[in-house]
Image: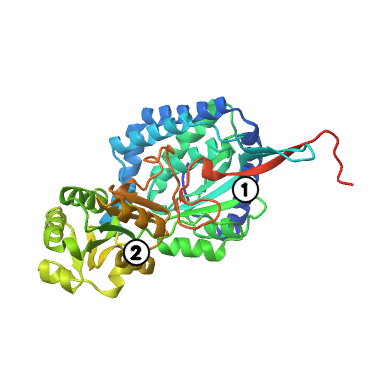
């Protein structure tokens, strides 16, 4: 598929044609047996492997164009595929195929005094529109998750990854056709014109049931402002690591270094480190030395700067910033209460971690911290659907309705009630 710019007058018609195909495909998927969906996923994985060289060549062109456009190192990292990352994409499809089919699952069943038997049954959402930036692997993850959940997907990837996404999408479509499923089940918007996003958000309410944005703050804000259908929002990942007064030093060093530096450009990367004053003398400098040695810039409050002279002064804005880069803001706090206060004020309700050997402190942190994902003695980089056993995810939902945390197969379903009687009337 060649992505192109289209005359504005043609875009609405193009998108509505895609919507009609998706709606028809969604009906077929809702009735498709698990075996056909899984066959499509496994076939897609096999085709991706067979075209590794071509997909990586397309990605190399995207990366070179992105470098010429001045994309940041963090965005270039998110854009880049190599053989290992592409194999992970293929494995992700196979993992999703192995998951239980959520469609038709009985979530609850009970009998009323009048003899009515009521069941709550999981069903597909229908058509899911997904708008994302930079990461070509999302093309596979999103399409696969929607397929497994029995929903059709309309994917609008970022222009930065247009060649990579098109190459991966072609593999998914061939997998669908091999399994006898409609190609309209997973569609990639074939234009780079941003007007297509506007049509998805407000001009396709009879076709699209929910929109999932995955990208930067400005993209999510636009989707939330313009969408005329429900949105599963993934906001900023301003993630925190709190090193408690009862933290083991070796563990605190390992967890913090991984949380920040394993991959700095993902939403689960730690952006702020909070250190309990009770262990500032023993823990702060070793942790910051590890980060600095790994190439991380330290921005600290006044006390951090005194204890670690290489730190730059942190501004008020630093506490609110998702760097997606090798930069971390650091503050010394007075225990769990102060850490919770800081997170409540500056966090984005995404992911927070506590490092502690005190079970009571861990319990309080997980009970009182109002974020989608909370970790005890583990890196924030585990904020990922694959690591949760979901196979993959299409974002971390930070809202509180319908889905929260990694949005995987189950989160892309809804439910209906089935009531069975024996002739009861209400009278």
Q: Which residue is mark 2?
A: 340
Q: Position of residue 96 (x, y in %)?
A: 46, 33
Q: In the picture, residue 413 is in which quadrant?
A: top right
Q: In the picture, residue 93 is in which quadrant?
A: top left
Q: Is residue 326 visible?
A: yes
Q: Residue at x 63, y 53 (%)?
A: 13
Query: Which structural element holds mark 1?
Result: helix
Residue 38 vs 147, above or below: the answer is: above
18 or 246: nearer the viewer? 246
C-alpha span from label 1 to label 2:
45 Å
Residue 379 vs 147, above or below: the answer is: below
81 sits to left or right of 192: left
195 or 110: nearer the viewer? 110
Q: Residue at x 54, y 32 (%)?
A: 101
Q: Position of residue 398 (x, y in %)?
A: 45, 57
| Mark 1 neighbour class, 10 Å CA radius: few under 14, some 14 to 19, many 20 or more | many
Residue 24 vs 363, above or below: the answer is: above
Give the colouring mode of the picture: rainbow
Q: How many marks?
A: 2
Query: Which structural element holds mark 2?
Result: helix
388 or 56: nearer the viewer? 388
Q: Are the two marked residues, 1 and 2, in contact with CB atoms closer than 8 angstroms? A: no
Mark on residue 297?
A: none
Residue 248 vs 301, above or below: the answer is: above
Q: Which residue is mark 1?
A: 19
Q: Position of residue 246 (x, y in %)?
A: 22, 55
201 or 108: nearer the viewer? 108
332 sits to left or right of 132: left
Q: Is residue 72 visible?
A: no
Nearer-N-terminus badge (1/2): 1
């Amino acid at each position: 598929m060649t992505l192109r710019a289209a005359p504005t007058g043609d875009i609405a018609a193009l998108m509505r044609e895609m919507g009609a195909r998706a709606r028809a495909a969604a009906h077929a998927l809702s009735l498709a047996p698990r075996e056909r969906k899984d066959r499509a996923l496994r076939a897609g994985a096999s085709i991706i492997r067979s075209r590794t060289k071509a997909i990586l060549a397309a990605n190399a062109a995207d990366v070179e164009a992105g470098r010429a456009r001045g994309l940041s190192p963090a965005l270039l990292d998110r854009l880049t595929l190599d053989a290992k990352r592409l194999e992970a994409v293929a494995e992700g499809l196979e993992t999703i195929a192995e998951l239980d089919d959520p469609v038709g699952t009985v979530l609850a069943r009970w009998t009323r005094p009048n003899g009515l038997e009521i069941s709550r049954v999981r069903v597909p959402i229908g058509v899911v529109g997904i708008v994302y930036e930079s990461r070509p692997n999302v093309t596979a993850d999103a399409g696969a998750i929607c397929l497994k959940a029995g929903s059709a997907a309309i994917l609008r990837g970022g222009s930065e990854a247009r060649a990579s996404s098109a190459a991966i999408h072609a593999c998914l479509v061939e997998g669908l056709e091999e399994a006898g499923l409609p190609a309209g089940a997973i569609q990639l918007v074939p234009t780079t014109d941003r007007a297509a996003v506007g049509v998805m958000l407000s001009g396709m309410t009879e076709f699209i049931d929910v929109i999932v944005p995955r990208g930067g703050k400005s993209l999510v804000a636009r989707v939330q402002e313009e969408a005329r259908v429900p949105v599963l929002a993934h906001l900023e990942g301003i993630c925190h690591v709190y090193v408690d007064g009862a933290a083991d030093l070796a563990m605190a060093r390992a967890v913090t270094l991984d949380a920040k530096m394993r991959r700095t450009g993902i939403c689960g990367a730690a952006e702020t480190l909070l250190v309990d004053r009770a262990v500032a003398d023993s823990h702060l400098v070793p942790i910051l030395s590890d980060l600095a040695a790994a190439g991380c810039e330290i921005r600290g409050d006044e006390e951090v700067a005194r204890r670690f002279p290489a730190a730059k002064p942190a501004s008020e804005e630093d506490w609110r910033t998702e760097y997606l880069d090798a930069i971390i803001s650091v503050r010394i706090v007075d225990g769990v209460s102060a850490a919770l206060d800081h997170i409540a004020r500056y966090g984005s309700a995404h992911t927070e971690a506590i490092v502690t050997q005190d079970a009571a402190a861990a319990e309080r942190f997980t009970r009182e911290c109002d974020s989608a994902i909370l970790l005890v003695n583990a890196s924030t980089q585990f904020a990922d659907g694959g690591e949760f056993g979901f196979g993959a995810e299409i974002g971390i939902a930070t809202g509180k309705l319908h889905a929260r945390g990694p949005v995987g197969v189950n989160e892309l379903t809804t439910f209906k009630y089935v009531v069975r009687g024996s002739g009861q009337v209400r009278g």
